[in-house]
Each structure stands twice: as C-alpha cells, then as structure tokens.
Amino acid sequence: MKITGFREHITQHDWRRPVGDVNGVSEGHRTDVQVLVISTDTGLEGVSVTAAAPLRTARIFPAIEGQDPRSTTALYDLMLAHVFKTGHNGDLFATIGAIDHALWDLKAKAADEPLWRMLGGRTRFVPGYASALEFALTDADARSVYQTFADAGFSSAKVKGGRDLDDDIRRLQLVREVMAQNSNRPALMLDANEVWNRSQAIRYIRQLEAAVDLTWVEEPVRRWDARGLADVRHGTAAGVASGENLTGLEQYRPLLDADALDVVQFNSGWGITHALRVAAVAHGRDLPVSPVGFSNVIAHAMTAIPNHLTTEVQDLGQPIGVTMDQEIVDGGYLLGTSPGAGITLDESQFATHDRSPGWQTTSGPHVRPERAGLRLVPDARRNDVSYDRGA
C-alpha cells in the first residue's frame, strides 16, 4: 500500500450559539472545520477532521508521498524532519497532526478494525467533561446549554472566564447547580486562556476558591511560563492544567522540570502520535493527561492511554457533511465499531452552505487582545471588551 494523493475541504460546525473565551468571541454561530482525505493505490482512504488550524498539506505531503501509510509513527517523524529548518509550529504542526490522524485511520481500516482497538484500547467508552465555550452567553443561555450536557450524563464542566470575579463566581455557581443533576460534588474548572500575569492569577484564583471548589484552572498565565505556572500551582489550592498550545514534545520539558502542572493537556488536533508521546512522558511523572479541543478523533487514542483523566467535549453535534460512528452518552464518548475512526463524509455538502467568518475575525479568540496580562484589575466592565453576561 502506498500513499498517492490528498484532498482538502473546509466545512463548518454549527454551534447554534456564539462561542469564545476571555480573548474574544466568534462572529456568528459557525466556525471552520478542516477535512483532510489521504488516498492510496489500493483505494482505501484515510480521513481526518480537525478544527485546530488551517491546513498546509501541500507543504508537508512530499514527506509521505509514496510511503506505506501503516508506518504511522515513522511517517510522523519524517514530517517533523521535513520542516526542520523552519520549525513545526502553528499551522504546520496542525497539518502534521491532521495527516497523522488520517494515517492512523488508514492503518485501522487496512486491518479492518476500529481505531480504538488498533491502538490497544480495551473499552470504547471515553469519559469527558462539558466545555461549552460559553463566554459570550447570558446566564440564562449558559444554563440552557449546560443543561443539554447534564441531560447527556455529564457531571463536570469547564467555564471560560478571567476578566470579572463576580461574573465568574456567579457563572461557576450556576454551572455547579446544573451539573448537580448527576453528582453531589460536580468537578468545576475555569479556563483563563493566558489572560493573567502570575501574581494577578494567584490573587484572582484565591478569591474564586473562597466561593467555589475549583478542580483546576487552565492556562492561568502564558503557555511557556514554567516558573509562572509553578508559582500559581503552589500558591493556590486548585490544580493547574496547561499544554494545549504547545506544539512539540520538547516544549513540555521546562514545565515538567519546574513541577508546574497537575494536568498535562494537548490539543486534540495535534495528532494521535503526539498524544501518545505526551501521555507517555506525563505517565513517567505520575501525571494525568486531558485532550483539549475538537476531540472526536483523538478520543480513540484515549482508550489506550493509562493516565487519561477526562476529555473535553465542546458540543453534542457534528460538523456539516460529517458523520462519526460515536455517541455522546453517560458523560463521554461511546465509540463505534466501524473500521478506522468511523468517519463518513458527504463531500457534496461542504460547498452548499453559507460560510460564516467564525474565528477569522480581528476580535476573535484566536487574536490576543492588546492589554491581556497588563490590567491592574481584571474587570470587564472597565476595560477593552464588550459583552453582556448578565442574568
């Protein structure tokens, strides 16, 4: 079997609500999803679906063209070597991850096995937590969205915040109320998306903890600030989670050496091989791992990772034109038994819907605000952001 070609598509995910975080909010209710199909000389095709970043497959494809797609980990290293001089950050790392997902899909299809079994998983259920990206919603709308997660069995949830203490306390208490449907002590997480400096983070989290029991705080300071993350970890009771924006195994070393993390995260779009390697390094330090982002494909790998804690689930629906052999039940993913990752595409739908700008706006969450980390008092009502999260 040899790799012969590829095709890319852009579809969208309809959230039915604006989504975003402390750094900004999407325009409209739809955001881009990248679909990649890798073809072979046998007719088998590998499919990847990711929202991590725009793909640059033409830049990476020469590294794998003509190769046997079943050599997944070796081809992953070939792709990293292919961009050695310029580095493997950003869109390039997202592209490598998307190709890696497609190659693992191909490998499992060639063996006529579901991907979770190919990877060594014993059970096809993957526990998760609700994460609605609800920053722009009113309390009433946030309650409604999290109620859908609670009705699907979720007992833990993550809230976006970091700009207004009173807002965050109220929102966390609201979500705790909803999740209490399934647990007497719901796990609550807050994601600050790198908006604080370290001393501000410690003060803010301590005040939150006076009102709410926090399981972890995510990205309280910049992703690479090992000393800052360690200071936050040792200065608060909540765990510290980070790693979703690190693009390479080597970038975890300073954070782990600084004893800066309680939960090691990785982006779901960075590839299965990357996830397996990060999980192994974390496991060597007795640390749990948790994937972040559009998790549908990476969930297969979580079945084979002994230190998997929980997987972020951002929505209960699927992208336009994409059907995945999985259900969201009992607070997690129940993966199907179709060969590969179980992804079926209706490519005719990809160009038939109006494309919303989604994340691609100058005020969206993918653009760091000018004053992030530089505010003396993180109060949204007195700073450079406009939104309404009233009751």
Image (cartoon, rainbow, N blue to C red):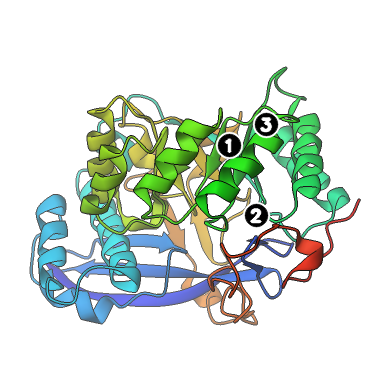
**Residue 228 picture location, percent across and down:** 43, 47
Residue 133 is tagged as 2
Q: Residues within 10 Å of mark 3 (few under 14, many from 20)?
A: some
Where is residue 118? Give x, y as percent: 24, 38
| CB contact under 8 Å: marks 2 and 3 | no
The vertical placement of 295 against 51, above or below, is above
Q: Nearer the viewer, mark 3 or mark 1?
A: 3
Crowding near pointer 2: few (<14 within 10 Å), some, many (20+)?
Answer: many
* Distance of label 3 from label 1 (alpha carbons): 20 Å
What is the quadrant of residue 290 in the picture? top left
The image quarter in which residue 329 lies? top right
- Residue 205 lies, in percent from the top left, at 63, 39
Residue denoted by label 1: 129
Mark 2 and mark 3 lie on one chain; the one further toward the N terminus is 2
Q: Is residue 162 visible?
A: yes
From this view, report whether residue 249 is shown above or below residue 239: below
Q: Give how far apart the Cα atoms at labels 2 and 3 are.
A: 21 Å
Q: Amino acid at mark 3?
A: Glu
Q: Which mark is residue 209?
A: 3
Q: Quadrant of the N terminus?
A: bottom left
Above or below: residue 357 compared with residue 374: below
- Cα distance, mark 1 to mark 2? 12 Å
170 or 301, which lies in front? 170
| Residue at screen point 42% across, 35% down | 263
The residue under label 1 is which amino acid type?
A: Tyr
Relative placement, left or right, of 300 versus 85 is right
Residue 290 marker: none
Pinpoint residue 292: horizontal percent, then vertical percent: 47, 48
Q: Nearer the viewer, residue 274 or 217?
A: 217
Q: Residue at x 22, y 28 (%)?
A: 284
